[in-house]
Amino acid sequence: MTKTRLSLLYNPLGGSSREDEMHEFEHRLAERYETQLLAIEEGSDPALLARRAIAEGAEVVVAAGGDGTVSAVASALLGSKAALGIVPRGTANSLAAYFGIDADIDAACATLLAGHRHAIDLARFDERTMLLMASAGVHARAVTQANPRIKSWLGPLAYVLKGMEVFFSQDPFTLRIDYDGNELSCCANALTVSNAAPPTSLLAQGTPRNIADDGKLDVTLVSAERFSEALVTAYQLWRGVQEERHVDDPHVLSFRCRRMKVSVEPQQAWMIDGEEAGVRGEVTIECLPRALRLLVPAEGSLGAQP
């Protein structure tokens, strides 16, 4: 029987993506896959490695890393027939958390060997591909400015602590949003546009559960000005996650759309999938419905809801 060709991309300098661990994956996957290991050397682009793997016949490309690595590999798969696999090895592991893909080597191998493919949305942020979310304001600064050493100690909690710190220095900005034939003008100090965000990304939770395959973007605007307001709003966002409902809070505005054009004043620093995306005053974000095939645990295959 001909085996499926799989390329596993990993960072040899990463503490949990050790060479010996990757060879263990190679050994365990041998029953189903013809496996190729590709090291992401310092300064190299995971997307270029992924495109090379596809050109050489890979039908599954596995990203062993964090959100940045997974997002880069996913962008290379757009327009191809190859499926994305994930071995979570980062701080937040947002997409893996969303679909219940475990970091444990036994569970990760079981997911890859089972081969359950689930089509999910991607998005286009101007010229870039977006897998998880884009943001401006508090959320963007918390993710991109978090201290690497604190992230290694505290994991996702490091983003929460950094968010509390930057809240006091984040001035509100004005927005004009044109979306699906509608117009909206408002002020906010945090804007998050998500495709697939786990419950831990509170500032992306204004809508009742992010749905990764519904062909829509989830937009959450937060306009809390005082710390007491921010605490109450954070609690309401958390409750919204628990109860899977729209957040009822005067400082939160949320909606879903397929395409949006955003103008911000003054210009803001943007974050896409955990990486800095530069300072911009105007961006266009569009959903690309079911553009990516992802290997997921059977129980993690989340279907779109009406």
Image (spheres, grey):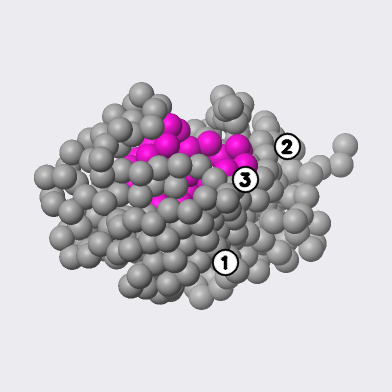
Badge 3 marks a residue whose secondary structure is strand
Look at the image and give the residue range highlighted in magenta.
192-218
Magenta residue check for 194: yes
Magenta residue check for 217: yes
Question: Based on the displayed image, in which of its 4 quarters is residue 300 positioned?
Answer: top right
Badge 2 marks a residue whose secondary structure is loop
Residue drawn at the location 75% of the way across and 56% of the way down: 79
- N-term mark: 2 or 1: 2
Where is residue 133 shown, x and y percent of the image?
Answer: 47, 52
Amino acid found under the numbered disc labelled 2: Glu
Residue drawn at the location 39% of the way across and 57% of the way down: 185
Viewer-closest of 270 and 229: 229
* Residue ID for mark 1: 126
**Residue mark closest to the camera, 2 vs 3:** 3
Q: Which mark is residue 31?
A: 2
Amino acid found under the numbered disc labelled 1: Asp
* Residue ID for mark 3: 121
- Name, please, the residue furthest toward the right: 1
Question: Based on the displayed image, in which of its 4 quarters is residue 260 positioned?
Answer: bottom right
Where is residue 219 shown, x and y percent of the image?
Answer: 44, 47
Q: CA distance from mark 1 to mark 3?
A: 16 Å
What predominant SS class does the magenta segment belong to?
loop
Residue drawn at the location 69% of the way across and 36% of the way down: 117
How crowded pointer 2 is (Cα within 10 Å; few <14, some 14-19, many 20+) is rated as few
Question: Based on the displayed image, in which of its 4 quarters is residue 304 positioned?
Answer: top right
Where is residue 202 shown, x and y percent of the image?
Answer: 33, 42
Judge whether 281 appears above or below 254 on screen. below
- N-term mark: 1 or 3: 3
Residue drawn at the location 38% of the way across and 32% of the way down: 246
